[in-house]
Amino acid sequence: MTEPDKTGILLTAFGTSVPGADSVYYNIQQQVREVYPDIPIYWAYTSQVIREKLKNQGKPVHSPVQALSLMAENGLEHVAMQSLLIIPGLEHHDLIQISRAIQGLPKGIKKIVLGNPLLSHSRDLQRFAAAMMDNISPSVHEDEAIILMGHGSVHPANVYYSALQYHFWLCHPNIFVGAVEGTPSLEEILPLLQKNELTRARLYPLMVVAGEHAINDMAGRQTDSWITVLSNMGIDAKAVMKGLGSFENINEIWLDHLREIMGRL
Ligand code: CO
């Protein structure tokens, strides 16, 4: 990093349109600000649907391409683009393409380095599982399941959820990882709960913010929400409405990925 005054950080999240849910993004920003107090921080949301909703509410947020153009306009030549996504799925691969396409344009940004999402290397999964075990408070009861609801993906990176399940099982047999739009599905988890005679469950979103999916698919009153399905099975289920970005030790994993790319700018 030769020219700190021409360096910027771009934090790139999926985005949320749920009022207040974005406060976890500010937690992440605060943690980044503490490490890099003098480097400007920009934001982008990858979800076009969410950006459209926010625009209609008069709260526009940039797309990654828009944010990078603005950064170039503001004279920045080196950009650390940190992916605040969970797995290297479709959205992350879009970021890879965007960073390559925008880098090196005339009078533009000379170098863009993209930081890995939360779960990339095996050590991230190990570290994430250990950190979440610390965050699950009070600790797990013998008859209790802890179920983390991820988004899931049609991208091959969906296997990260199963890989994460493996790392959690090394920590505790009552932790389960599922995906609302992928595998493992809740249907695959249910027989395991019965087999282990677990009678209560705590649900956590395996997502950066406790947004639409956490509110509806996880904790909603609808018949197919995870909390309803579990309750109908006689399992006393509760939802913990805390996105991953509200846990400092989880944000530290993203921060380490950012530190790594700052070293390569
Ligand atoms: Co979704």
Image (spheres, helix red, strand yellow):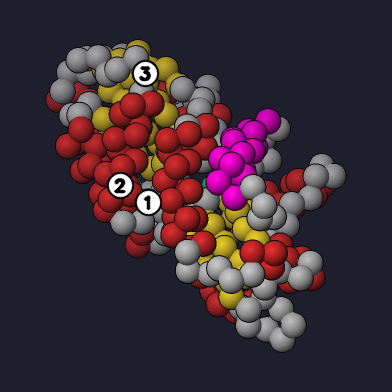
- Work out how far the residue at label 2 is from the one at label 1, CA to CA, in angstroms: 6 Å
Residue interval drawn in magenta: 20-36
- Residues 226 and 24: in front is 24
Rendering coords of residue 46 (x, y %): 61, 57
- Residues 6 and 14: in front is 6
Q: Residues within 10 Å of mark 3 (few under 14, many from 20)?
A: few
Q: Please, is residue 66 above or below residue 59 in the view?
A: below
Q: Quadrant of residue 33?
A: top right
Please indicate whether residue 169 sits to the left or right of residue 238 in the image. Answer: left
Dot 3 or dot 1: first in sequence order is 1
Q: Please, is residue 254 above or below residue 108 in the view?
A: above
Ligand 1 is within 8 Å of the C-beta of the residue at disc 3: no
Q: Which mark is residue 119?
A: 1
Q: Quadrant of residue 130?
A: top left
Residue occupying image coordinates x 55% and y 77%: 100
Please indicate whether residue 35 sits to the left or right of residue 137 in the image. Answer: right
Residue hosting label 2: 125
Rendering coords of residue 43 (x, y %): 67, 53
- Work out how far the residue at label 3 is from the one at label 1, CA to CA, in angstroms: 22 Å
Dot 2 or dot 1: first in sequence order is 1
Q: Residue furthest front?
A: 2
Kind of residue indicated by mark 1 = Leu
Residue occupying image coordinates x 59% and y 55%: 12
Secondary structure under badge 3? loop
Please indicate whether residue 61 sits to the left or right of residue 188 in the image. Answer: right
Q: Residues within 10 Å of mark 2 (few under 14, many from 20)?
A: many
Secondary structure under badge 2? helix
